Image (spheres, grey):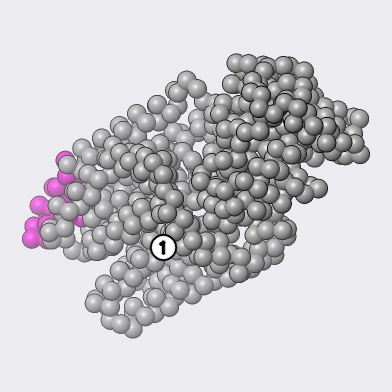
Amino acid sequence: MGLVALLTLTVRMPFAIDPLSSDEGGLLLVASQWRPGTSLYGNYWVDRPPLLLDFFSLANTLGGTIALRMLGACLVAFSVVLAGRIGATAVPRTHVLRWTPVLTAGTAAVFLVNPLFGALEVDGELVAVALVLLSAERMLRASSAGGAISTRWLYFTAGAAAAAAVLVKQNEVDALVLMAVLSVGTVRHRGGASAARAVATFFAGAVTCVGVVLAHALTRGTTLPGLWEAVVTFRLDASAVISSSASSATSARLRSVLVCLVVSGAPAIVVLLARRLRARVAPPAVNLRPAAIALLAWESVSMLAGGSYWLHYLLVLVPGLVFAVAVICAGSGNADEVPAARSSRTVPASLLAVLTYAAVASLAAISVVGFRTDSTSGGDAIGAWLATHKQPGDTAVVAYGHANILQDSGLSSPYPELWSLPIKVRDPQLLDLTRVLAGRSRPDWVVTTGASLDAWGIDSSSATVELRDHYRDVAIVGDSHIYHRLPQPSVAAHHQHKRSHRGSVVVVRSLSGWRPDPEPHDQHTPDHGPKDAEQGPGSNGVLLGDQDPVYDGR
């Protein structure tokens, strides 16, 4: 198990310096300023529980991007070790036991480094999987523990880990499902009183964990009603919005997720599990067949119910797949066989074949990601451009989503919504954004997808007026346009200039001399004067606008 865990660390190390994804950058940005402010988490709002923000706060304190990736790699290695311990606890002590911990650990390793599962991104699912496996390992050990004190402690820590998983990602209730299934077995074999004590101790641990995490969140300015809205009410509203406004892109993502799932080899493990369900389990194995079925059923529903269909949603299947492999190994020893016959059995060839294929598919996907020729995304180029041209104290709004641009550029945002789905649910007519763009503390930069705010089916009419009145288009990076705030004395002249050119078609040219006009009496001091633009056409797809770009009324 230790060797398998070390291999996962080795595989993930080269990706520690990769650019941040939108979620990684956004969560690091939110965590970096989480203190009493104007929104749920400081000055920003995100529909995630507080323990996930605590994790990203730790990564931010330790250094940011590389620290986040290293923490993610350590969590994956920890998950691999836990998966091996689950295999060792679940299978009878026969010859197969020598291999079962390695196979369950290998199952976790294969899928927790697989780009087909979006596993190279450090997100809520990756963190929660480690906590679910920790809770499961504690529960299985408690089921076979002899001493009353050790049993109570194991159930207590299992409950704490189960609650922690939910406090990272609100749909990660796998450990609660597992506890419910195991409690039924406890009632049948040890009686209702024993099951009641186990459940009570489990929930005592869960309540303790919830209390500690929420108390810490309150000290940082997060409110309990605000959390309820974010993790419960918002998700219900978001489901309605997603179902009513799903586009062809949503269907394409679903197809991509299903294709990646099939190519990964995970469904073949479920097929092997189905074949083993009729086999009699060799005593004294823990019968995990109901648990494996329940976990996989819930995880499948959880993966699909969100409606957004991102690859990293597939990570929620990992605990169920680990339990499935444990059940397959347990079923390889028939209860009617004598111990000598059982001990001569080897690991099922079909399982070895499936896991070998899954490992090869994972390595192939890693190779494709690792050796891709273009590692710079549009978001990276935009962040680099803003970092080059920003002035001290500048702020920005990115419409819509792509919060990694703000993190990469070192800019904050006066608009609390950093992701597109919360905007569609909480600010569908962009009234809040309009107030931000019209206010005295309007952002210095606005980044749009395309030449306007029209995207995602959002009513942008009011915000568009403010964008045209107070900003000018100064750069194009890929498909995105970058707008810079007009200096206040130039607004009237700009409007007159726009009216005199109404109906004209503007071609954004490349001129290296563009620079932001200084605001009178603003935060830009003579020691930090404006910087000349340094990029021309063909440099990361950047085109700069001319000295006084004309608005064509689009």
The one of 255 and 311 positioned closer to us in this rendering: 255
- How far across and how far down the image is residue 265, in percent? 27, 40
**Quick check: 208 left or right of 279?**
right
Q: Residues within 10 Å of mark 1 (few under 14, many from 20)?
A: many
Q: Which residues are magenta?
A: 330-349
Q: Is residue 405 visible?
A: no
The one of 344 and 474 positioned closer to us in this rendering: 474
- How far across and how far down the image is residue 171, in percent? 43, 60
Q: Is 436 placed above or below 511 here?
A: below
Q: Residue at x 44, y 23 (%)?
A: 371
Q: Residue at x 64, y 59 (%)?
A: 40
Q: Is 158 placed above or below 554 here?
A: below
The one of 213 and 267 positioned closer to us in this rendering: 267
Q: Report the quarter where the N terminus lies.
A: top left
Q: Is residue 43 visible?
A: yes
Q: Predominant secondary structure in magenta?
A: loop
Callout 1: SS: loop
Q: Residue at x 56, y 61 (%)?
A: 230
Q: Is residue 155 magenta?
A: no
Quadrant housing residue 534: top right
- How far across and how far down the image is residue 177, in percent? 35, 66
- How far across and how far down the image is residue 92, in percent? 22, 58
Q: Is residue 331 magenta?
A: yes
Q: Is 507 placed above or below 421 here?
A: above
Q: Is 79 placed above or below 12 here?
A: below
The one of 158 and 252 positioned closer to us in this rendering: 252
**Quick check: 284 left or right of 308?**
left
> According to the image, label 1 marks what residue?
173
Q: Amino acid at mark 1?
A: Val
Q: Residue at x 33, y 57 (%)?
A: 301
**Quick check: 78 left or right of 116?**
right
